[in-house]
Image (spheres, rainbow, N blue to C red):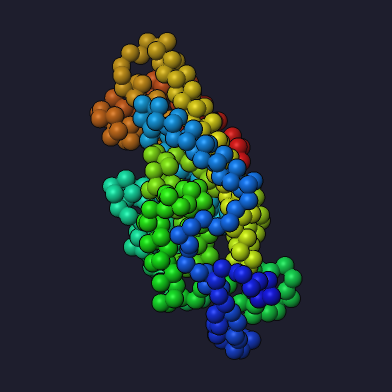
């Protein structure tokens, strides 16, 4: 890490760390430990206040649209799979969006899909905790990170704060043979009590009521910066941190239904995203970071709302196809709703969710296939999975 980039007003301190490389020998360097977050907003310029205001308006419009739906949770799963794909791509785990939407969540076909679908499981667990009134805590964060890393090579080291040193990225201006800590783009807090104290202070800050002094969008930006800068886990920090943006907005009441995909926008601007985070640490540049973050939330809310409206329109169109057919059973309309809420599904899921017999579920699926509402992912597969092509087309549009 280039220590000269840290200015005198950097919101933290550089602490000495030491170690030994098996090839290069002993080394000594510095790690950055951020100050605790303030109880007041950082100094922001008028353009940033305007960006924050526009983000609040976009989030309010998204929430209002969700409130108007008969079942606001209907679109949560499609939204989560899009978010899972983008947030994982930011960390180098990539799978095509169409594969993510049609993947078997009980038996993912690749290691990449395992990690991506783990994110969906983690998010559902986190949303359920907050909806049940659980406060965001160190225990909750550790539990969520453990879910994220299930069945991955780092599972044994997960579900708890890291106890060792990690480094982030690689500088563009270093020779190929350097100590990793010197070649890193950023070196976060060392593990141990210092890190644990920082994370506990962060979750205490997130639980506090800052509504009189800090706009919720700014508060989400501040907590996101702090989490990413502490980098508390061995892996998964970016994914957990971006999930916390939505969880924070849910816990503060900005979003009643956490249907928001933030990562596609950041993924499309990943270099600037990392630069803005680093700019706070090195030069106390909260203004540029908060403005970038607010612009991202505004675009994310607008894009999610458009997708929500498009999915509701498709739902209505598919229901109309059923009404125009010889089918009259309410279960046929319920199957349309299931197909909108679940990018792919099996007959067994139809049986369980609709509360009908397997034979009835299988017949219903077949009838909707005949109507062109549903199709099969792989007709030769032992466990056939079905999807609604018109729903998938909406979900795979690029909106970042």
139 or 150, which is in the foreground?
139
Position above or below: 370 against 120 = above
- Horizontally, residue 76 falls left or right of residue 179, namely left
Residue beneath the point at 64% across and 73% down: 8
Quarter of the rendering containing residue 73:
top left
- Residue 5, x across and y down, in percent: 68, 71
Q: Is residue 365 above or below residue 22?
A: above
Q: Residue at x 44, y 35 (%)?
A: 63
**Residue 340: quadrant of the picture:** top left
Q: Is residue 383 visible?
A: no
Q: What residue is at 58 percent from the left and 46 percent from the top?
A: 49
Which quarter of the picture shows residue 331? top left
Q: Is 294 situated left or right of 77 in this image?
A: right
Tell how many labels. Answer: 0
Decide if residue 169 is on the left or right side of residue 189: right
Considering every residue shown, the one lying at the far bottom of the view is 26
User: Residue 302 or 94: which is nearer the viewer?
Assistant: 302
> Do we see residue 225 in this rendering?
yes
Q: Residue drawn at (48%, 63%), measured in percent from left and top?
A: 37
Q: Is residue 362 above or below residue 199?
A: above
In the picture, which quadrant includes the N terminus?
A: bottom right
Q: Quadrant of the C terminus?
A: top right
Q: Position of residue 16 (x, y in %)?
A: 55, 83
């Amino acid at each position: 890490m280039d220590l000269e980039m840290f200015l005198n007003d950097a919101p933290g301190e550089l602490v000495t760390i030491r170690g030994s490389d098996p090839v290069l020998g002993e080394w000594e360097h510095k790690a950055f430990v951020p100050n605790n977050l303030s109880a007041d907003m950082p100094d922001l310029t008028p353009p940033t206040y305007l960006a924050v205001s526009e983000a609040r308006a976009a989030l309010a419009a998204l929430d209002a649209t969700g409130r108007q739906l008969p079942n606001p949770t209907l679109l949560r799963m499609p939204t989560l799979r899009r978010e899972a794909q983008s947030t994982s791509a930011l960390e180098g785990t990539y799978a095509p969006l169409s594969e993510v939407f049609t993947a078997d969540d009980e038996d993912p076909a690749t290691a990449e899909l395992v990690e991506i679908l783990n994110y969906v499981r983690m998010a559902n667990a986190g949303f359920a905790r907050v909806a049940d009134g659980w406060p965001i805590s160190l225990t909750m964060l550790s539990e969520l990170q453990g879910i994220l890393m299930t069945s991955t090579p780092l599972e044994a080291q997960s579900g708890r704060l890291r106890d060792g040193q990690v480094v982030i990225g690689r500088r563009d201006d270093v020779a190929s043979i350097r100590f990793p800590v010197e070649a890193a783009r950023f070196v976060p807090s060392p593990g141990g009590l210092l890190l644990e104290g920082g994370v506990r202070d962060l979750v205490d800050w997130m639980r506090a009521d800052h509504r009189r002094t800090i706009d919720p969008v700014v508060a989400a930006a501040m907590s996101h910066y702090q989490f990413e800068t502490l980098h508390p886990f061995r892996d998964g920090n970016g994914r957990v941190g971006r999930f916390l943006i939505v969880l924070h907005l849910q816990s503060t009441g900005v979003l009643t239904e956490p249907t928001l995909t933030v990562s596609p926008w950041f993924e499309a601007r990943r270099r600037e995203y990392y630069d803005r985070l680093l700019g706070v640490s090195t030069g106390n540049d909260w203004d540029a970071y908060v403005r970038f973050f607010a612009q991202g939330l505004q675009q994310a809310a607008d894009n999610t709302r458009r997708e929500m409206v498009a999915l509701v329109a498709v739902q209505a169109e598919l229901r109309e196809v059923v009404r125009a057919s010889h089918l009259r059973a309410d279960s046929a309309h319920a199957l349309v709703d299931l197909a909108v809420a679940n990018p792919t599904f099996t007959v067994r899921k139809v049986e369980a969710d609709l509360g009908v017999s397997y034979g009835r579920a299988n017949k219903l699926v077949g009838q909707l296939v005949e109507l062109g509402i549903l199709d099969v992912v792989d007709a030769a597969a032992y466990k056939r999975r079905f999807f609604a092509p018109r729903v998938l087309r909406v979900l795979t549009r690029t909106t970042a």
